[in-house]
Image (cartoon, helix red, strand yellow):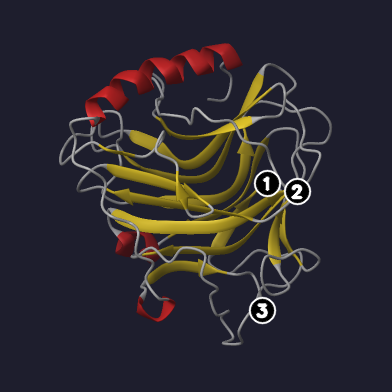
Amino acid sequence: MSSLPYRRILLLLAAVAAPALAADASAAAPPDASDIVPLKKATFFIYEDFESTDVGKIPKGFTSKGSVGVVDDVAHTGKHSLRLNAAVSGARQIVKQGAELAAMGGEHWGRLFFKVQLPSPLPQGGGVHTTIVVGSAKSPLAKDNIEVRLMGTMTGGDGAFRFLYNVQPPPGRQEFGPSTKKSYHYTDDWTLAEWHVDFATQTYQFYINGEELPDISFTKGEGKFAGAEIPAVFESMSFGWQNYQPVKGTGFVTWIDDLAVSKQRIGGQTLLPANGAPKKQ
């Protein structure tokens, strides 16, 4: 979604999302996610609170895209968080590959806390699409390389945005995915974002501050890949900020903290850092 005009983007999402949502009405209901698993019983594939990472660096086991680095002047818990530095457009992300993702298989729960420096920038044009969590994979439908954007936003000219799930296939196939009807505004308070995907049932769920957003949550059903394309395994996962269209000024400045990808839903519970010392809320 790097060059489409904003109006065309909206028309594309609306056209694809409408039949997909209609088809979902007959699909099985998403799994019950009301239970939060205690931390001591959860299985973690990725966990990072940035406390053991030096200022200006990124955590071990990740690579970086764009300007990112740990800071000690802003944090959700503890003293450290990851700052995603200003850029008019492009990626500011940390990227994970390797055995942790293979171990996840086709189902996982993810969560992170994020905040945005205010005033947040406005698009240079009609709108701007941003991705915050994305996984690369092989499509279970077309067997080609895709990006599954597990957490994204679409910001309009007034600064309000909508959350969205979308899949970016290679040229020749159109991207697709639903977005929320409700608009939100960026905040410099810490916000909890959670997502859940399941290859077996082609399920996606998304939560903000513990509340599910039904407009973009769906269950297609076993083997029903159209309109979902949730993969059997992710080849890489990226966390951070990437806006595909340019914004005014110097760009978004954002932070993430207390990132976790696990087998069970843990919600907003506080984790223990790698050195074993408890983080204070």
Q: Residue at x 66, y 30 (%)?
A: 160
The dot on residue 66 is 1
Residue 119 image-quadrant placement: top right
Along the line of sight, which residue is nearer the eye, 9 or 1? 9
Residue most toward the right?
Answer: 249
Residue 55: x and y, percent? 76, 69
Q: How far apart are marks 3 and 1 (CA)?
A: 30 Å
Q: Earlier in the sequence, mark 3 or mark 1?
A: 1
Amino acid beneath label 2: Asn
Q: Earlier in the sequence, mark 2 or mark 1?
A: 1
Residue 115, compared with residue 263, is above or below; it is above
Q: What element carries label 2?
A: loop
Label 2: few (<14), some (14–19) or many (≥20) C-alpha neighbours in 10 Å: many
Residue 206: x and y, percent? 43, 46
Q: Which residue is drawn at 23% across and 30% down?
A: 25
Front: mark 2 or 1: 2
Amino acid beneath label 1: Gly
Residue 187 image-quadrant placement: top right
Labels 3 and 1 touching (C-beta < 8 A): no
Query: Mark 3 — residue?
Result: 280
Labels 2 and 3 touching (C-beta < 8 A): no
Q: Distance between the residues labelled 2 and 1?
A: 8 Å
On the question of residue 173 being in view, the answer is no
Query: Mark 2 — residue?
Result: 85
Residue 74 image-quadrant placement: bottom right
